[in-house]
Image (cartoon, rainbow, N blue to C red):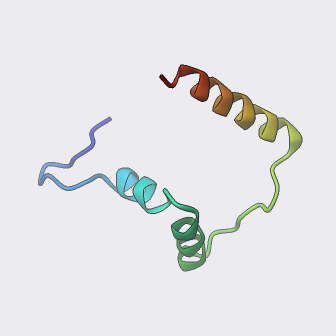
Amino acid sequence: MATRDRAGHKTLADAVRELIGTEDNRRHVHKLLGLAVDPELPPTLASLLEAIGKAKDDKAP
């Protein structure tokens, strides 16, 4: 996937990822755009995210 457009600017997807990189920004963007946020993940998704996080930590040097 391209990380820059023809003019050399970040793609929209990259800009949004950067914006929601911190919890404070994430809350602000949700409020600004009027996005609904699920307060709690279903147990299956929570365990999947935990497993992904552990696998990522295991790969880190």
Farthest residue in the right direction? 43
Residue 15 placed where, x, y %? 36, 58
Residue sitting nearer the eye, 40 or 34: 40
**Residue 43 location, quadrant:** top right
| Residue 5 relative to residue 56: left or right | left
Above or below 4: residue 61:
above
Residue pictured at 44% horizontal, 53% vertical? 17
| Residue 38 relative to residue 52: left or right | right
Residue 3 placed where, x, y %? 27, 43
Residue sitting nearer the eye, 19 or 53: 53
Residue 22 placed where, x, y %? 52, 60
Residue pictured at 43% horizontal, 58% vertical? 16
Residue 18 placed where, x, y %? 41, 56
**Residue 59 location, quadrant:** top right
Residue pictured at 39% horizontal, 51% vertical? 13
Residue sitting nearer the eye, 39 or 2: 39
Farthest residue in the bottom direction? 32
Farthest residue in the left direction? 7
Dividing the image into 4 quarters, which one contains the N terminus? top left
Q: How many marks?
A: 0
Above or below 32: residue 4:
above
Residue sitting nearer the eye, 34 or 19: 19
